[in-house]
Amino acid sequence: MRVRDLPLSQPVVDHFAERGVRELYPPQRAAVEAGVCEGADVVAAVPTASGKTFIAQIALLTADGPGLYVCPLRALAREKYETFAALPGVDVGISTGDFDATGEALAGNDVVVATSEKVDSAIRNGASWVDELACVVVDEVHLLGAKRRGPTLEVTLATLRRRNPELQTVALSATVDNPDAIADWLDAELVESEWRPVELRTGVAVGGEVAFDDGTSLSVDVDSIADGADGEGDEGGDAGEVGDAGDANDPTEVTAALVADAVADGGQCLAFVRSRREAVDLAERLADDGLAAELGVEDAAAAAAEEATDVDGTLTGRQLADCLRAGVAFHHAGLRSGHRGVVESAFRERDVACICATPTLAAGINVPARRVVVRDQRRYGEGGMSWIPTLEVHQMCGRAGRPGLDPHGEAVLVADADTRDEVHERYVEGEPEAVESQLADPAALRTHVLAAVATGFAATETEILDVFEGTFYARETGAGGLADAVAVAVDDLVAAGMVTRETGGVEDYRLVATAVGETTSKQYVRPETGERIVAGLRAAADVSDATTLTAFEVICDTPDMQDTYLGNAERADVYQFARTNAAHLTTDMTEPDDFEGWLESVKTARILDEWIGGATVEELVERYRIGPGDLDSRVERAEWLLSAAEALGETIGVRVPAVSRARSRL
């Protein structure tokens, strides 16, 4: 099937032809046959790089009205926005921030690209444009199973479908264990395929020997790589052990040899490790191998390094620039968006031979490589070291193979003699996990129950059940389990002062959001955050000398502010800071049930207070051992939460000038 055979305008057909897209891939053809161009609901569960974006494009281009493209990450939203904006004759809008706005300026666009959180918040704030949608495309729909993002994605999609029963839904997924369950939930045709445009072979490396799943093998010279490492070992092998200096079985040296081998053959690599520090360490180790010269990109690599230097003067930025000059980069959530952009762009332009990354890079960003090396398959969690989910590893491996550039892609999992069989069984032969709803999480359910009541979608528990009837959770658990969970959530919201019961009898009470509950929902903060901010504002009003530190402590000690790691070496310092500034804090040091968590919030508040006091990014990053990207994210969240605090203060009639001062100076 050819692109010109589809119901697309000639300028659009020409647009695709100019980019070499003339013939449909098998999964794309299957989606067309399933009716994606005729308004049919479709779930496409296909591997990375198998043409999911094209399926989204033709669905939105052939829809009988405006379309919405929902994606999980803001960086991915920007990338997709640029892809859609390049289509001739298509007006595209993007929305990823301002959680207290309706986004009405988006009305009138042919396509809107947004995160699920933004769509959810727009609905809560009364957006009318969502009711005009003819088609919604949900990228990475398997993230229904993600604890943090899953519930919002699930409820948002269910709400859109409930408000507009004629809405076409197209869901794009990685290959998972139960795509049929997702398709059944959405009453959609399932397009399931293992086809890839570039063949992928996956293998396990022990020492320098790799055994691939297609029966082929590969040998790399680890000894020469290890000898060239100046006898430096690396912490964090596959099992969390420390490799011996120059040890040819050290997973870092095996990884270095695999990278060098691919680069010598003209390819690029992605190397995945478990932590930020190890991503930096591995990149600095690989920088010693002169990969820029091997790939012949010294000048381009130097230019990328200068771009990274221009972002800021932090130690992280300097480390990244040094690595870039050598043709290597690292990528993790602690980088500033500017740094991540430099790395991703340089890699796409083939100006970087290898990116050493944490698994966040595998979450949708378009950076394919000839070879993917997964050095670590275990990482630290609440219960200690544990195996990474198979789906997550498959997402990493799926980045191997660049259409039009590589004859094949290779994914190599680094193991040792003791773990080889289990690594092979889990990740080479093993199937990815089934997607399971996370809406049962009490905090998530409370948030969305409050939204249903505050927006007027539901006024009784029966009506709340009607709202959630279309969720994946309801399909999986049945009416009884959902009813019990909703009843508990309502009780919690009443106890928190977010919702009241107006009774006309035992059986027919109505639920009404309080003024605080309504503001909390519109400001897009969790009920627990709204409750904490209200209590903090009232306490701050009684502080005789409330300062901006007071305001920051109130918003930082909430579930919606990201935790800031508190190292052993600085715990005593933060404790002493809290004691010294006790008169400016709303929490007595004897009160917190989670004292460690409260100290972390004090550290975050201190960082923000020093930031508005004139401290530079470089100073704060060095002083508090945080990534520059971490500082950016804390500042952004603080702006949002201070805005919510102002709105909640107005709602309860409590004005704390320090909150407004902190927000304006931030």
Image (cartoon, rainbow, N blue to C red):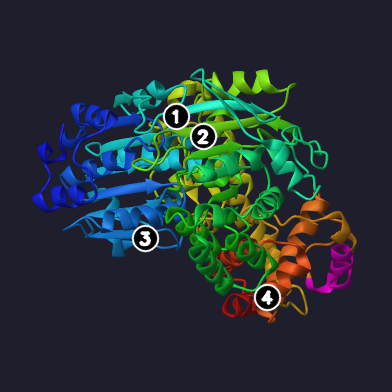
Q: Quick one: label 3, few (<14), some, or many (20+) residues within 10 Å?
A: many
| Residue 605 position in % (x across, y down) | 72, 67
Q: Earlier in the sequence, mark 3 or mark 4?
A: 3
Q: Say which residue label 4 marks.
A: 611
Q: Nearer the viewer, mark 1 or mark 4?
A: 1
The reply to whether discs 3 and 2 touch (Cβ–Cβ < 8 Å) is no
Give amino acid for label 3. Thr
The reply to whether discs 1 and 4 touch (Cβ–Cβ < 8 Å) is no
Answer with left or right where residue 658 lies relative to residue 594.
left
Q: Is residue 73 above or below residue 491?
A: below
Q: Which mark is residue 200?
A: 1
Q: Nearer the viewer, mark 2 or mark 4?
A: 2
Q: Which quadrant of the structure image shows residue 191? A: top left
Considering depth in this image, is 576 or 78 the residue closer to the camera? 78
Q: Which mark is residue 397?
A: 2
For the record, the magenta segment spans: 573-584
Q: Which mark is residue 102?
A: 3
CA–CA distance in space, label 2 to label 4: 40 Å
Give amino acid for label 1. Leu
Q: Regarding mark 4 in the picture, which secondary structure is present there?
A: helix
Q: Which quadrant of the structure image shows residue 105? A: bottom left
The reply to whether discs 1 and 2 touch (Cβ–Cβ < 8 Å) is yes
Residue at the spot x=51%, y=69% of the render? 303
Q: Regarding mark 2 in the picture, which secondary structure is present there?
A: helix
CA–CA distance in space, label 3 to label 4: 30 Å
| Residue 71 position in % (x across, y down) | 41, 47
